[in-house]
Amino acid sequence: MSSSAPGREPAGENVTFDRHMVLDQLGGWRGMVDASLPTIAFIVANGLGGLRVGIWAAVIAAVLVFLLRLVRRESIQQAISGLFAVAVAVFIAARTGEARDFFVIGIIRNLAIGVVVLGSLLVRRPLVGVVAEFLAPSHLGSLSGHKLPSFRDRLRRGTDPVAADAADTPVRGGARPADPEPDRPWREDPRMLRAYGWLTVLWGGVFLLRGGVQYVLYRADEVGLLGTSSVVLGLPVTAVQLVVTLWVVARLHRHRAAEQPPA
């Protein structure tokens, strides 16, 4: 089209993708807790009343999480994903009649993600670095002034430090201004590449560990331990990973900001 509406970017110009919208869709800490509730309900109900009761408990918990997010007018993307995952898990368990099959999809997912994350190191594209630099580019210095306590406080409030800072940035015409291009790509900085590499090893290793432990328990038909490991190695371990990742990324941003030439 040759014309553009008032207040919008003209056709043919580059439009910067709003990464802050992606952060809002992640669900934060509450989203991770909500995602764990159907599994917890299945574990408890299956232990008390058997497979059929466990299936119904998981379905009801997933539906309640979805409805609560609707009532709170929060993003339902994660709730929909949870509903779909629970529906597939319930379908498999119901068809096989084995309670352990409720966790098959989770085991496959963890192992597959672990392989993909670690595989990104082979092409010198550590996935944690790719994601971190997309959400909060280090050359902007957006996290260079943050320290771990400020991250912790904001995480408790359920807000993201990057999104919160971006919310105060004035915009014109309803569009966020495009980010400047970096003087030096982060992959050409040995320190950043090495740090993002180790973070990628951390995340990929945890996914493989989680999937491997659950696979061993699945083979042993230890449904109770399988469910417990799914919860224990899920939210608590992810929380620790996030804290470590945010701390390292904040230090990398301060390192990068110190190297930037004065404006």
Image (spheres, rainbow, N blue to C red):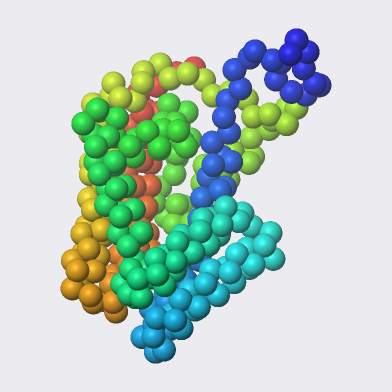
Q: Going by the picture, which residue comes out furthest to the front?
A: 95
On screen, residue 12 versus residue 98, left or right, reads: right
* Point 44% across, 57% down: residue: 152
Where is residue 10 shown, x and y percent of the image?
A: 71, 15
* Point 58% across, 41% down: residue: 21
On screen, residue 151 versus residue 113, left or right, reads: right
Q: Going by the picture, which residue comes out furthest to the top?
A: 2
Rendered image quadrant of residue 68:
bottom right
* Point 39% across, 89% down: residue: 48
Image height check: is 172 above or below 240?
above
Where is residue 230 shown, x and y percent of the image?
A: 32, 67
Rendered image quadrant of residue 116:
top left
Q: Nearer the viewer, residue 44 or 151?
A: 44
* Point 57% across, 47% down: residue: 24
Image height check: is 47 above or below 202?
below
Image height check: is 233 above or below 208?
below
- Kindly tell me whether residue 132 is visible in this rendering: yes
Where is residue 61 shown, x and y percent of the image?
A: 53, 73
Q: Nearer the viewer, residue 166 or 175?
A: 175
- Kindly tell me whether residue 191 is visible in this rendering: no
On screen, residue 174 versus residue 100, left or right, reads: right
Where is residue 39 shown, x and y percent of the image?
A: 42, 71
Q: Nearer the viewer, residue 262 or 237?
A: 237
